Amino acid sequence: MLNMDTLNKNDVVSEVAQKTGQSKKDTAETIEVLLNVVTDNIKNGRKVNFTGFGSFVVRKRKGRQGHNPRTGEKMEIPAVNVPKFKAGAVLKQAVK
């Protein structure tokens, strides 16, 4: 049975700091920089790939016809860019 507890960013920082011997402050700064690098690059149309772990990309979601759930009135939902993560082979195998 899977453990469905949720780790937040602080939990990850604590665990990484403990495993690397770095301070929590330095670890938090490093993780923040990593997240910013991934975000900035996918925002600019680049794919970010961590071999075996997975890839981060931006995909275009097409515009479509929808309806307002309160009024039932039809409305146009515009096209948007959405972030996507595709798990790599090593990650997929680890969670099997």
Image (tube, grey):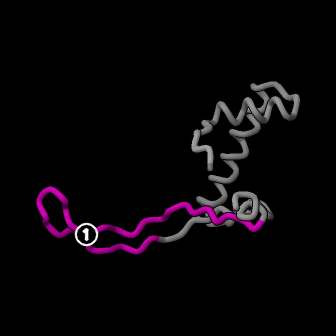
Could you classify mark 1 by the number of other residues whose Cα lies within 10 Å: few (under 14), some (14-19), or many (20 or more)? few
Which quadrant would residue 42 be assigned to in this image? bottom right
Q: Position of residue 43 (x, y in %)?
A: 59, 59
Q: Position of residue 79 (x, y in %)?
A: 39, 69
Please name the residue shown 70% across and 50% down the image.
37
Please name the residue shown 55% across and 60% down the image.
83
Position of 19 relative to 95 (above/below): above
Position of 22 relative to 44 (above/below): above
Element marked by disc 1: strand
Viewer-nearest residue: 16 or 74: 16
Q: Is residue 73 left or right of residue 50?
A: left
Please name the residue shown 72% across and 33% down the image.
13
Magenta stretch containing residue 70, yes or no?
yes
The mark tally for this picture is 1
Which quadrant would residue 73 be assigned to in this image? bottom left
Residues drawn in magenta: 61-89
Q: Position of residue 41 (x, y in %)?
A: 66, 58
Residue pointed to by mark 1: 66
Viewer-nearest residue: 49 or 7: 7
